């Protein structure tokens, strides 16, 4: 539902030295009415580092602001988080057990594309425009020109895949976008000083054996801007980007801080944030996939083992079918089939499965219990 | 389809089938991958409803309907390649409705008043937002029959509600629509086409939940956790149960806890009564280790468990689970409280895992936390005993000296 939102200009204070304009928040915050100003652009800087709040803010702007007459640039960054594309499979894209241990959240965004690692050293830029004005290369030009301005020695180039490469080799920016009925947004990352070791350890599959048609990520060698231009300051980068954006689009917008959790400014943004945090969105939107994998089972007490096969289909994040081929002399067929039944219809999630399986385990004892315990452990490892 | 309210036959009301073609996405893109369908054949759609999600080159695109009608055919499966300019879906539109020829349908605010008589049915473009259109469709109302009271005869949500109120005197199902008719003078919660201010400080009068009579039995298959529970509970109730109940004077415990509570809070720990009960249980088990045992298969042997892994029944989003505190015999009340906080946080987040849920040797169930006084708990195999705690009450029972 499109809603025209007219707000008046906010007062701002110039901060000497850095050149960044800061705004004082008044109890009611206003943006300038586009029809009454020569500049029909807006540059916003999110004050939040919560990935869900920032994604919700993107959604809100896309749904509520009239982009036919103006364009908007939103600058934001997040505390460590992994963000997957709209049609991706989190189990193949990232290492969820490792993320849980490191308390790094997983978010699914509404735009397409691949998986990215965000932290405070990564800048996100979102270019909002009407569908007619959607032009990703032009937006990326803003970034490359701004970089060349602050660091003339940097060799940066946008590719036809909408990546930005440093020295023709290292990826410093990736792109994704979303097109709705009349509006569009194109967002990209920009690696200023991100933690590259965390990036590489987390962006690997949670488990093997998954077959799906979900959008795969294309891994690339990455680099931080500060690896090659160590003196580049964060504020300097922001300022250059704002200037270049204004210059490219003929605008005179000031950098305006906003708080994505402000319901008075963005009514309904809380609900959008809640939806982005929900299991139904994050996992339930995973395209249908199959799990075909070999399970190595072990009975420690008897120092014995065997191989079994797991066939599962997961749709909307729920186990739609489950079959385990386990040798009958290892576990009675009735147990394997009952176990499959217990998993059916439940979320493909190690916690939900653990809850169901733990209850199930109580009804068996002795050798069977031991082997079932082992089977459950192996199954849970498949679920990430 | 806007047919007769009592009788709906697709044949009698069949309208023209329109091939909705995939319009230009931009940037010279000629084909996209269909990623998700939001509709299926037979579904009703309104103009601007989402039809499907397609992906092209890192762009995720939502395709919305240009027409009101019924989906009659989907041209692609999920993961199929859809071509720009070729049909995406077939929509059966209402007979006589205006078909837009434009690429992008723009909602025009101004409409000539002459076009807005409700005697005109053909060639009539009724002015209403998609939300209002949907509301009308859901209630089988022809927009042309509703008098619009908005700007330029635009039909507002209130107009639909008034129309409905006049139409039906019978019991309406308790949808949000029904509540809005019940409480006039309050604005609907969704943003409306024209602003209507909510009087400050007015809250909707509290309504008792009205019994919903849908008239149909609903079947829901048991799955996952609940299915497993059936099996386990059946096994549990085969265990011969012996129960023993008593009342305990907790006056001194209440005092002790209130003294220690603030100290615990300073260390970031929330101290309830449970850590005390858990520790007390463990101390009791030291005297009566048989209660911390397990019978093996065939009831041949009794295995005395060394660790006191005391479980606490917890209601979580995963279901009624029993995570346990490991090795209570070696923990202080404060350490038990810490661990309990951790388990409760995991339970609330739906993240209790195998290590928390397995290995219990004795269980406590706190029925008092939901206000119960007495309970008849069920032993959780392979354990042999379970304790249930009722609510702490202020009373005047004589205490034993």
Image: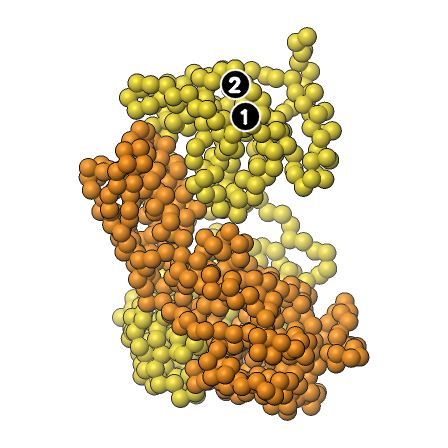
Chain colours: A orange, B yellow
Q: Nearer the viewer, residue A359 or B218?
A: A359
- Badge 1 marks a residue whose secondary structure is helix
Q: Which x, y percent locates residue B358?
A: 43, 35
Residue B80 visible in the snapshot? yes
The answer to whether marks 1 and 2 sit on the same chain is yes
Q: Is residue A104 left or right of residue A342?
A: right
Q: Which x, y percent locates residue B271?
A: 65, 34
Chain of the residue where label 2 is placed in the rendered structure: B
The image quadrant of residue B343 is: top right
At x 67%, y 67%, the residue is: A47
Is residue B30 depicted above or below A81 in this figure?
below
Is residue A11 depicted above or below A109 in this figure?
below
Is residue B331 depicted above or below A86 in this figure?
above
Neighbours of disc 2 within 10 Å: few (<14), some (14-19), many (20+)? some
Q: Which x, y percent locates residue A9?
A: 74, 79
Chain of the residue where label 1 is placed in the rendered structure: B
- Badge 2 marks a residue whose secondary structure is helix
Task: Residue lying at the far top in this picture: please name it.
Answer: B401
The image quadrant of residue A274 is: bottom right
At x 63%, y 25%, the residue is: B392
At x 41%, y 28%, the residue is: B380
The image quadrant of residue A34 is: bottom right
At x 75%, y 74%, the residue is: A23
Q: Nearer the viewer, residue A195 or A125?
A: A195
- Which residue does the numbered mark 1 point to in the structure image? B329
Q: Is residue A245 left or right of residue A380?
A: right
The residues tagged by marks 1 and 2 sit, at their Cα atoms, a distance apart of 8 Å
Q: Nearer the viewer, residue A195 or A255?
A: A195
Neighbours of disc 1 within 10 Å: few (<14), some (14-19), many (20+)? some
Q: Are marks 1 and 2 in contact (CB under 8 Å)?
A: yes
- Lower sequence index among marks 1 and 2: 2
- Which residue does the numbered mark 2 point to in the structure image? B286
């Amino acid at each position: 539902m499109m809603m025209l939102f007219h707000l008046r200009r906010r007062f701002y204070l110039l901060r000497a030295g850095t050149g960044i304009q800061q705004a004082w928040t008044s109890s009611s915050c206003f943006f300038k009415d586009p029809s009454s100003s020569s500049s029909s652009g807006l540059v916003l800087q999110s004050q939040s580092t919560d990935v869900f709040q920032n994604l919700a803010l993107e959604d809100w702007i896309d749904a509520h602001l009239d982009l036919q007459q103006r364009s908007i640039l939103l600058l934001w960054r997040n505390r460590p988080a992994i963000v997957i594309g709209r049609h991706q499979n989190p189990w193949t894209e990232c290492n969820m057990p490792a993320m849980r241990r490191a308390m790094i959240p997983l978010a699914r965004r509404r735009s397409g594309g691949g998986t990215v690692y965000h932290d405070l050293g990564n800048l996100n830029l979102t270019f909002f425009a009407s569908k007619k004005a959607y032009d990703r290369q032009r937006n990326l030009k803003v970034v490359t020109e701004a970089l060349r301005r602050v660091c003339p020695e940097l060799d940066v180039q946008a590719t036809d895949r909408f990546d930005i490469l440093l020295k023709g080799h290292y990826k410093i920016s990736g792109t994704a976008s979303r097109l709705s009925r009349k509006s569009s947004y194109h967002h990209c990352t920009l690696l200023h000083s991100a933690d590259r070791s965390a990036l590489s350890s987390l962006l690997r599959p949670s488990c093997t054996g998954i077959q799906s048609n979900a959008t795969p990520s294309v891994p690339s060698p990455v680099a931080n801007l500060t690896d090659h231009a160590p003196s580049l300051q964060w504020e300097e980068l922001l300022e250059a980007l704002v200037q270049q954006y204004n210059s490219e689009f003929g605008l005179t917008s000031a950098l305006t801080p906003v708080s994505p959790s402000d319901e008075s400014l963005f009514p309904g943004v809380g609900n959008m944030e809640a939806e982005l945090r929900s299991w139904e969105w994050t996992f339930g939107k995973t395209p249908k996939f199959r799990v075909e994998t070999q399970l190595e089972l072990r009975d420690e007490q008897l120092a014995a083992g065997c191989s079994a096969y797991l066939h599962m289909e997961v749709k909307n994040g729920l186990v739609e079918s489950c079959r385990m081929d386990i040798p009958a002399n290892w576990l009675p067929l009735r147990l394997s089939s009952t176990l499959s039944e217990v998993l059916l219809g439940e979320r493909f999630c190690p916690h939900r499965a653990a809850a169901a399986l733990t209850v199930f385990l109580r009804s068996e004892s002795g050798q069977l219990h031991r082997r079932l315990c082992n089977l459950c452990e192996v199954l849970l490892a498949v679920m990430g | 389809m806007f047919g007769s309210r009592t009788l709906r036959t697709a044949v009698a009301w069949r309208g023209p089938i329109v091939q909705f073609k995939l319009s230009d996405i931009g940037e010279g893109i000629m084909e996209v991958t269909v990623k998700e369908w939001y509709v299926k054949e037979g579904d009703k759609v309104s103009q601007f409803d989402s039809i499907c999600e397609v992906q092209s080159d890192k762009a995720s695109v939502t395709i919305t309907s240009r027409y009101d009608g019924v989906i009659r055919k989907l041209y692609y499966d999920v993961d199929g390649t859809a071509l720009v300019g070729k049909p995406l879906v077939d929509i059966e539109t209402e007979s006589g409705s205006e078909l837009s020829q434009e690429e992008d349908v723009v909602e025009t605010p101004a409409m000539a008043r002459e076009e807005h008589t409700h005697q005109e049915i053909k060639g009539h473009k009724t002015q209403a937002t998609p939300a209002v259109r949907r509301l009308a469709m859901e209630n089988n109302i022809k927009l042309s029959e509703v008098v619009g009271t908005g700007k330029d005869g635009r039909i507002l949500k209130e107009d639909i509600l008034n129309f409905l109120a006049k139409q039906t005197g019978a019991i309406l199902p308790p949808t949000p629509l029904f509540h809005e008719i019940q409480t006039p003078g309050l604005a609907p919660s969704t943003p409306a086409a024209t602003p209507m201010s909510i009087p400050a400080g007015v809250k909707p009068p509290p309504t008792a939940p009205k019994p919903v009579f849908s008239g149909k039995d609903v079947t829901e298959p048991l799955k996952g956790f609940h299915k497993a529970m059936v099996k386990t509970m059946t096994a549990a109730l085969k265990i011969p149960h012996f129960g023993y109940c008593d009342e305990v004077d907790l006056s001194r415990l209440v005092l002790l806890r209130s003294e220690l509570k603030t100290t615990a809070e300073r260390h970031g720990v929330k101290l309830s009564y449970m850590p005390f009960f858990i520790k007390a249980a463990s101390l009791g088990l030291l005297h009566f280790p048989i209660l911390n045992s397990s019978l093996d298969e065939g009831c041949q042997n009794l295995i005395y468990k060394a660790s006191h892994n005391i479980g606490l029944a917890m209601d979580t989003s995963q279901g009624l689970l029993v995570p346990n505190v490991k090795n209570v015999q070696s923990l202080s009340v404060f350490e038990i409280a810490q661990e309990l906080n951790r388990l409760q946080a995991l339970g609330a987040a739906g993240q209790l895992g195998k290590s928390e849920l397995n290995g219990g040797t004795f269980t406590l169930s706190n029925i008092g936390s939901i206000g119960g006084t007495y309970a008849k708990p069920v032993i959780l195999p392979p354990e042999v005993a379970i304790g249930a705690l009722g609510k702490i009450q202020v009373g005047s029972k004589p205490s034993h000296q």
